[in-house]
Image (cartoon, rainbow, N blue to C red):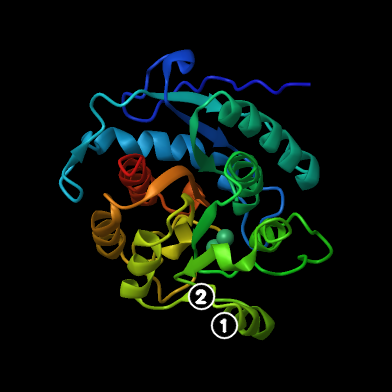
Amino acid sequence: MSYQVQPSTLRFLWADTPAAEADIIIVGFPFDGTTSYRAGTRFGPNALREGSWTLEVYSPHLDRSLTGMKIADVGDLPLPPTGSERVTQMIYEYCSTQVKAGKKLAGIGGEHSVSYGLIKACFDKYPDLQVFHFDAHADLREDWMGERWSHASIIKRVLDFLPPNRLTQYGIRSGTQDEFTWMRANNTLVENRDELIHRMKNANAPIFITFDLDFYDPAYFPGTGTPEPGGGSPHEIFSIFNEIKNDINLVGFDALELAPQFDSSNVSGVLAAKTLRELLLLF
Ligand code: MN
Ligand code: MN
């Protein structure tokens, strides 16, 4: 069975290239079936799209513009509200079809578990894939209350196929002692901006960026289900992207965990959209 997207009434900026002609596919995964604290990320994709309306297509941070890029915002993949293993499979099948057709994927969450299908589809095509994981949380639990496909286990599931030496985690400031012990023992945790830039510039391999937006401090990004104080800033991210923009081979990314009902201003939606724009400009 092949799963079809449903066009949204909203769109990310002007990303209106017909899907068949597009190089890049923006697709939403409106799912919050395993969120461990506060649900609501199923409303993330459209809040991000709405937030994009205040943005320009030109980024002064990167001195690059979306103008001329062939991008299609194809809408959302309709997903059931629960059943994360089946949802993961649906996302994987959709993403595999797109990656095999030569498309680059920009996924919008949705909770972090939706990443699995995106990353696995890219890994199938690029077996030397390197994953860069931005997040407040380690997401390395074997399961969350028995759920192996939880957003708290997503990176652990990715490690079922990805060797640990191809994973870098940045911004992590919450996890169990076991998770931190594992990250330090396996050298996946980077706590220093320069080291992150060094790793990205010297990856010498296709890169997937999985960007859990709760990476940002809740002062910048309150619209999320599991806010974790002590996080990074937009300035930090945009300056890092500027330093690596000419040296990486980005093949896919996602931007996740926007839960707009916790931010009545939707500044979180704007920051999510701006992060998406900067990531698109790294393609
Ligand atoms: Mn996460
Ligand atoms: Mn997180």
Q: Residue at x 35, y 48 (%)?
A: 275
Image-quadrant location for residue 170 = bottom left
Which quadrant of the rendered structure holds the N terminus?
Answer: top right
Q: Amino acid at mark 1?
A: Arg
Image-quadrant location for residue 282 = top left
Q: Amino acid at mark 2?
A: Leu
Alpha-carbon neighbours of circle 1 within 10 Å: few (<14), some, or many (≥20)? few
Determine whether the residue tagged by mark 1 lies in a helix, strand or loop: helix
Q: Residue at x 36, y 42 (%)?
A: 273
Which quadrant of the rendered structure holds the C terminus?
Answer: top left
Residue 256: x and y, percent? 51, 50
Residue holding disc 2: 189
Which residue is at the front of the view, 195 or 85? Answer: 195
Which residue is at the front of the view, 92 or 187? Answer: 187
227 to 212, vertically: above or below: below
Ligand 1 location (quadrant) = bottom right
Which residue is at the front of the view, 264 or 185? Answer: 185
Residue 99: x and y, percent? 57, 31
Q: Earlier in the sequence, mark 1 or mark 2?
A: 1
Residue holding disc 1: 184
